[in-house]
Image (tube, grey):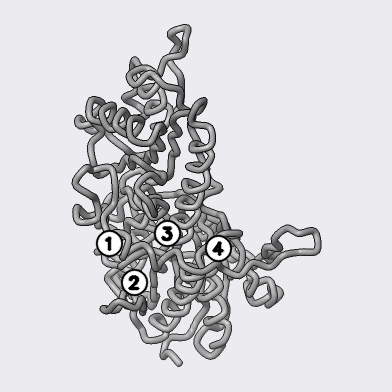
Amino acid sequence: MASLKGKAVVAQSGGPTAVINSSAAGVIQSALADPDTFTGVYGARNGILGVLNEELYDLAAEDPAEIDRLRRSPSALLGSCRHKLKSLDSDRSDYQRILQVFKAHDIRYFFYIGGNDSMDTAAKLGRLADEIEYELICVGVPKTIDNDLAFTDHCPGYGSVAKFNATAVMEAGLDTLALYTHDTCTVHEVMGRNAGWIAAATGLARRCEDDAPHIILLPEVPFVIEKFVDDAQRCLANYKRCFVVCGEGVKTPDGKYLGEAGGQFAKDSFGHTQLGGAADTVRAIIEQKVGVKARTNRAGTAQRVAMHFASATDAAEAYMVGQAAVQAAINGAGGKMVTLERAAGKKYKCTTGLVELEKVANGEKPVPPECIDTSGTGVTEAFRSYAGPLIRGQADVEIGDDGLPVYARLAQHPVEKKT
């Protein structure tokens, strides 16, 4: 039991994932199991915005079965947001408002599930609380499909989106194989604006030399049109087809996003500029420079919330970091984010650790050079060894009598406002 007693707030931030709710369940169930430390456990509706607006709800009043069902439900069912607070040095009003709400409700623990910006928010809240001598323990819980948080081996959410896209490429690759006399090329666009971890994961689908994907375009490798055209022509000569995976954040050598730099290639037959992302530019280059038909695939938001095919490893680790966050808080480890630590050895094993929130907030982790092959368009065995264990197993999903998944529904019983 911790020496500090008070209520806890759990909040989610940023893009939903297949397993962010599993992390929330880990926090909620662990906190509710220790009523001597946590005198109440609240959810914030739509992340930090819910705190700012004092829109809190009582998680202890929820049906325990629905809380447990969070472990098998996608999206961010506490309610998420994309809201970046201003610099603490330039404008403290939002932070002061948050602490006003915390004081009014005797909230002494804040668990924020999210990425870099969320860790930054939690770190600054902790700093201000220290300055005004308000006892508050802030703990970050990692979440991002992009897998770009520094100081952690990998991020909950990544294994599931990697599994989904690798499988989608495998299946769409067979479609291209079947119809290569008509649909010669396919461009599959994946999420990942500044890091290519998701795009790289599709390389796991390539078990044999002629399997898709034949070309992987990563944000870490500048896109050079001439080289790409040569690579595509080589694929067509070798395999009679070409399957390209394109990260949405691929850039040209001058640093422009490919979707923004399409220029002459992003034109329709009437010369009008076509709006679209990186995949549309790549498709246009293939059709105009290589001279063959191409089509584009986009999974969109479906790729990040595909609970029906989520990784069992990912779901289990997401729950584990939620549990670890509560234990860290009980131990008084404020100002920290839970990390995933991979044990040495051939057999995959993962435990948790802690890192300072401020380090995570200011860091970013691109795909390292040793994971990218010499062509710049494929992955190495080192990457396969890294990512392979993260996609293993299939997470449990409850199936209803109608044959479709049953996901959690929270009543969100509101807490009376006090400010």
Tell me the CA gap for discs 3 and 2.
14 Å
Label ID, residue 150: 1
Sequence-earlier tag: 2 or 1: 1
Asked which secondary structure carries label 3, the reply is: helix
Q: Earlier in the sequence, mark 4 or mark 1?
A: 4
Would residue 217 appear left or right of 320 to someone viewing this image? Answer: left
Quarter of the figure that contains the C terminus: bottom right
Give the residue pinned by disc 3: 158
Q: Residue furthest bottom?
A: 1
Can you tell which of label 4 and label 1 is closer to the viewer? 1
Residue at image coords 29%, 42%: 219
Earlier residue among tags 1 and 3: 1
User: Mark 1 or mark 3: which is in front?
Assistant: 3
Q: Earlier in the sequence, mark 4 or mark 3?
A: 4
Q: Which mark is residue 339?
A: 2
Secondary element type, mark 1: loop
Quadrant the N terminus occupies: bottom left
Q: Residue at x 76, y 64 (%)?
A: 400
The residue under label 4 is 44
Callout 1 amino acid: Ala
